Image (cartoon, rainbow, N blue to C red):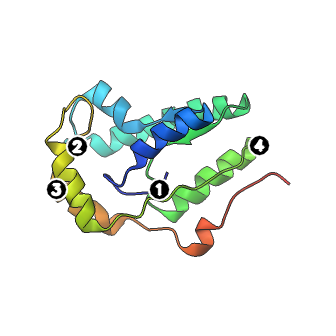
Amino acid sequence: MIGLPCSGKTTLARQLELELKGLRLTPDEWQRHLFGQDATHPEHDIRHSKIEQLLWNIAASALRLGTDVILDFGLWTRSERDDFRKRASALGANTVIHFLDVPHSELFARLEHRNKGAQDDVTYIPPYKLKEWIPMFQPPDASELDLTYKLS
């Protein structure tokens, strides 16, 4: 999954989980369970990275067993995406990219709606954080979207 918050990654990941009978790994769910609504906490990014590392270890085990895995990570940079494709390939797994490209105005509208919802089910994100994150996101270009790592 590639996309910013509120782009629909988790919604699509849940659909793929059922269609593929795969293992869905969504760091935000783990983060809320362990730390509550911590998007503005100084340790948020460190915690999130540790959770993603743990979830990748689970994903790697599942891939070794032949189970499809849906990484609902966001993967904001090309280098992150390249790294995970190489990791999966090293385990004998193919990769498929799902890029959710949503206009920024729509992201903010969805964020407003989401933030009014049940806080147990979604991660609350202050709008200023989304504004900070947008410039950090590197959308995949056409050549990257054409990449599918497969075993030869």
Give how far across and how far down residue 34 sits, in percent.
31, 25
Mark closer to the chain start, 2 or 1: 1
Amino acid type, label 1: Ile
Quick check: marks 1 and 3 in contact, CB under 8 Å?
no
Amino acid type indicated by mark 4 = Gly
Q: CA distance from mark 4 to mark 2?
A: 35 Å
Residue 2's tag is 1
For residue 127, the mark is 3
Locate residue 49 relative to residue 94 in the image: left or right: left
Identify the image quadrant of residue 21: top right
* Residue type, numbered disc 3: Pro
Residue 24 point in image, percent of width and height: 51, 34
Q: Earlier in the sequence, mark 4 or mark 1?
A: 1
| Viewer-closest of 18 and 145 | 18
Dividing the picture into quadrants, the one containing residue 29 is top left
Residue 150 seen in the current view: yes
Amino acid on which the number 2 mark rests in the picture: Ala
Q: Is residue 21 above or below residue 110?
A: above
Q: Which residue is mark 4?
A: 92
**Which residue is label 2 attached to?**
39
